[in-house]
Structures are given as structure tokens and as C-alpha cells.
Image: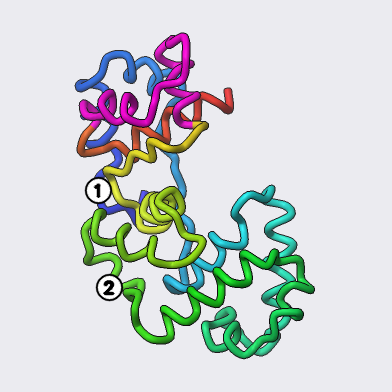
Amino acid sequence: MTGFGFDPRRAVAHLRKADPALAGVIGAVGPFVMQLKASRSLFGALAEAIVYQQLSNKAAATIYGRIEALYPRAKQGFTPAHIKRTADDKLRGVGLSRAKVLALRDLADKVATQRLPTLDEAHLLDDAKLIARLIEVRGIGRWSAEMFLMFRLGRPDVLPVDDYSLRKAYATAFRKRKLPSPEALAKAGEKWRPFRTVASWYLWQTLNT
């Protein structure tokens, strides 16, 4: 397993010891095989996040492919400069909503003016500081920032308490009668520190079984 900022085997061992109930979930799910998504740049990762919001993966991938097709010479993917010089109607024409066009423009502007860290710089920021920087972008909320930390950077201790599917998985796995509030899930997850990303991944997997 590569790319993570921690040892997955150590994380799983810690969680088994820290929470016997979660140990049962881990045993049922099996090995930790979470995959990180490759990122060519912070701009590319966040642009993809914006396009994919509130869409099925298939629909979002189609739209994202159409955006890339607007710039056939961009071998490393489209850049802030590409977005900044493309007319709104052309971006809307590939299937982007008005809100997503505005979000992509804001992202492009913030990257071009160096108001966001580079991908290398992002790796050096702690979770809280990085999330605070990312949510300055229009259309990037805390959940999107947390997904970036988990699935792009491989951070070990992210618990996205506002994620509905995670709350549902927790309620099912721990036999709760109702969904936990974000505050209740945060409290329950204290025992999973410093590997709440791994705990979250295991809980999500229970929805696929």
C-alpha cells in the first residue's frame, strides 16, 4: 500500500484494539484496500471535485471528458488559464451548471493568483489549516475538502461527520435506532483517533455488503 501518510496495518491493529465493536466490522469487511486517486495538481483535483458534485459518476465523467475535449492540446489536463479564457456559454454547453461554471472560475482565479497552496504545499499543511484554505473556493465545502484530504492526500485522521452515508453506516453497524447527529458521530469517533480515515472507510464498506 503506497501513498498514505501512515502505515495501514498499524492503523487497523490500533482500531481493532481501541474499539471491539469496530473490530467486528473490520473482520467482516476484510483487508484495508482503500485506493487513493492520483492528482496532477491541486487545481485538477478540485476542478474534478466541483464537476462531480451532486451527479452520478457516469454523468460527471461524461461532462468532465467534454471539458477536457475543449482543450485537445492540453496533454497534462486543462489549467486555470484554459478556464479563465473560455466563455461561459462554451462551458455551459458541455453540461456544467451556472453554479459550477462560477465555481470553476473562482478556483481558477485563486490558483492563478496563488491564493491556494500547490499540491506539494498542501502536503505540508495540517488538516485544519488545509481545510480552511480549500473552503475559501466557491463550491468547495467542508465535505469536499475532507474527501480531498482522505482520497487524494491519504491523510490518516479525517472523520467526515456530515456525510450521510457514513452516519447511516455507523447506525447500521452499531445497531442504533436512528442516525447519529454529526456531534454524536464525532464523539463516538474519538476512540478511533489517530486513524479515523481508516475507520470511516471500513464503515462505508458495510453499505456495499
The Cα atoms of the two marked residues, 2 and 1, are separated by 18 Å
Verify whether residue 178 appears in magenta.
yes
Label 1 packing within 10 angstroms: few (<14), some (14-19), many (20+): some
Looking at the picture, tell me which residue is in the foreground, 147 or 110: 110
Whole-percent x, y for residue 144 in the image: 46, 53
- Residues rendered magenta in the picture: 166-192
* Left or right: residue 84 compared with residue 113: right
Magenta: main secondary structure equals: helix
Tag 2 and tag 1, C-beta contact below 8 Å: no
Q: Secondary structure at mark 2?
A: helix
Which numbered dot is residue 189?
none
Label 1 sits on what residue type?
Phe
Determine the residue located farthest toward the right in the rendered image. Answer: 93
Mark toward the start of the polypeptide (2 vs 1): 1
Could you say which is closer to the camera, residue 77 or residue 28? 77
The quarter of the displayed image where residue 99 is located: bottom right
Quarter location, residue 21? top left
Query: Which residue is the site of mark 1?
Result: 6
Colour approach in the figure: rainbow
Total label count? 2
Does the magenta segment cover residue 2?
no
Which quarter of the rendered picture does the C terminus lie within?
top right
**Residue at x-position 24% and y-position 54%:** 128
Depicted 73 relative to depicted 63: above or below:
below
At 44% from the left and 9% from the top, the residue drawn is 175
Residue lying at 40% horizontally and 51% vertically, measured from the top left: 142
Number of the front mark, 2 or 1: 2
> Given the image, on which type of amino acid does mark 2 rest?
Glu
Point 28% across, 45% down: residue: 156
Q: Which residue is mark 2?
A: 121
| Secondary structure beneath label 1 | loop
Please say if 129 is above or below 70: above
